[in-house]
Image (tube, rainbow, N blue to C red):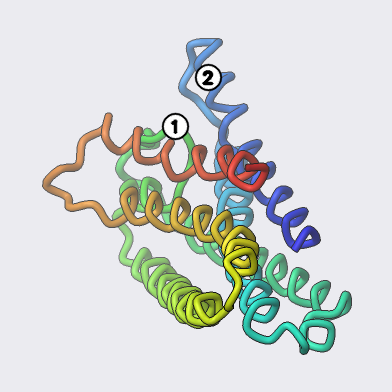
Amino acid sequence: MFFFLLNLALSDLGSICTTVPKAMQNSLWDTTTISYTGCAAQLFFFVFFISAEYSLLTTMCYDRYVSICKPLHYGTLLGSRACAHMAAAAWASAFLTALLHTANTFSLPLCHGNALGQFFCEVPQILKLTCSKSYLRELGLIAVSACLAFGCFVFIVFSYVQIFRAVLRIPSEQGRYKAFSTCLPHLAVVSLFVCTGILANLKPPSISSPSLDLALSVLYSVVPPALNPLIYSL
């Protein structure tokens, strides 16, 4: 668990460092500019760390499932080598996802100006600036990523159903408390991450406004990585 927490902390730190320092610099110096290369780098690293975080949260869910539902097989299923391989797979898949999104997005011609309605570079805001039909390729990639993310979400829900069924069968109250105490922080982090992401990206267009979009972007890009250490320390 602590090995995966280390990886989660690194993804949180990277996510915060990708967006917040540039936003603070623009705020302090009263500017609203970012270079084309800087925007591409910011988009790449943001997608990379967010994707890695979601993959690591899914992996940590499997870790909790095995530890509670199959404790006698824990050493076999989740040895040090298996944990290293799962963490490496999470980071590698995040790198591939970020590379594809960045390459696809920045291969599109921008014909609606170069002003983003956001405090950092993200794919939906950049797609609003293009008028090329090639953006359908990026939308297809987003759809594939959304399907994979939904698959991970279904896996997390199914795992927690099995975990809660196993915990409720534990005869002692102390045993149930110990099991719940190892799962609730992870469940809180997953809920915060998923709920803020859904609010920011799937809100109805009728209620969209620049101030609301900005607030929701801060909610899903800054708040979860900042609160994760607090949740796990409690």
Which x, y percent locates residue 26? 53, 19
Q: Is residue 88 above or below residue 181?
A: below
Q: Residue furthest top?
A: 29
Q: 44 or 91, which is in the foreground?
A: 91
* Helix, strand or loop for disc 2: helix
Q: Residue at x 83, y 72 (%)?
A: 84
Q: Amino acid at mark 2?
A: Asn
Q: Amino acid at mark 1?
A: Phe
* Helix, strand or loop for disc 1: loop
Q: Residue furthest front?
A: 172
Q: 49 or 155, which is in the foreground?
A: 155
The C terminus: image quadrant: top right
Q: Residue at x 42, y 66 (%)?
A: 138
Residue 29 visible somewhere in the drawing: yes
Q: Are marks 2 and 1 in contact (CB under 8 Å)?
A: yes
Q: Residue at x 75, y 63 (%)?
A: 1
Q: Is residue 131 above or below residue 36?
A: below
**Number of residues whose C-alpha sits closer than 10 Å to that of mark 2, classed few (under 14), some (14–19) or many (20 or more):** some
Q: Please name the residue that numbered disc 1 is placed on.
A: 119
Q: Residue furthest left?
A: 206
Q: Please name the residue that numbered disc 2 is placed on.
A: 26
